[in-house]
Amino acid sequence: MEQALNEKEVLYNDEYLTLYYDHSISCIIKEWKQAISENKFRELIIELVMKIVQTRMKYKKPVNLIADCRKLGGDTFTPQVIDWLNTEVHRLYAMNKITRKAFVASKNITANLSIVSYISMSNPIEGFTMSIFDDMEDAKNWSKI
């Protein structure tokens, strides 16, 4: 059990989000804890990008992303947020050699539609793929480096 705990390095934690690096699969996992305002969402995504860069430099290896959105809520991925992610964030993912981003969806159909809209409305970036899963283990298996 102790080994399993050591595989997860917490990078950030507040009332909205726990961000950790899972050494066993070389992924940064975002576990959203509740619905969030657009401004706070943007702030936390910037924090995530900084943690990606720091983690890549620290371990000198690529990382992928998993977003556990089961508690995020259906209003997060507005057209404005999707546009911001497309123009500001995805290029940073590409620059940092992130090739995959998995979403773990909630049981809420509306929330899932929000994620599906985000994935379908995102500008394609060469070498970067996003996919949606209803199970964390499936997301981890797909995201492994």
Image (cartoon, grey):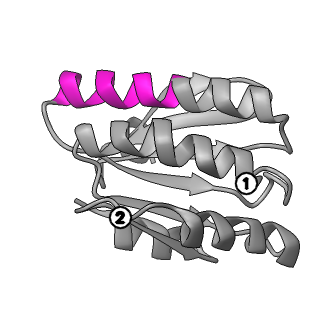
Choose between 93 and 33: the one closer to the eye: 93
Q: Name the amino acid, label 1.
A: Pro
| Dot label at residue 62 | none
Visible residue check, residue 144: yes
**Residue under the image location 50 percent in, 48 percent down:** 86
Label 1's element?
Answer: helix
The x and y percentages for residue 11 are 48, 25
Is residue 47 rendered to the left or right of residue 80? left
Judged by depth in the image, the label closer to the viewer, 1 or 2, is 1
Q: Is residue 47 above or below residue 23?
A: above
The x and y percentages for residue 23 are 30, 44
Is residue 86 rendered to the left or right of residue 104? left
The residue wearing badge 1 is 79
Label 2's element?
Answer: helix
User: Going from the N terminus, do you reach mark 1 or mark 2 first?
Assistant: 1
Q: Is residue 18 above or below residue 114?
A: above
Q: Is the magenta stretch mostly helix, strand or loop?
A: helix
Q: What stretch is highlighted in magenta?
A: 47-59
Query: Within 10 Å of the Cα at label 2, are there few (<14), some (14-19), or many (20+) other Cα atoms?
Result: many
Q: Name the amino acid, label 2.
A: Ser
The residue wearing badge 2 is 143
Query: Does the segment drawn in magenta span residue 99?
Result: no
**Alpha carbon distance from label 1 to label 2:** 26 Å
Q: Is residue 108 above or below residue 49?
A: below
**Residue under the image location 63 percent in, 63 percent down:** 118
Choose between 103 and 19: the one closer to the eye: 103
Choose between 125 and 15: the one closer to the eye: 125
Is residue 127 rendered to the left or right of residue 78? left
Choose between 80 and 40: the one closer to the eye: 80
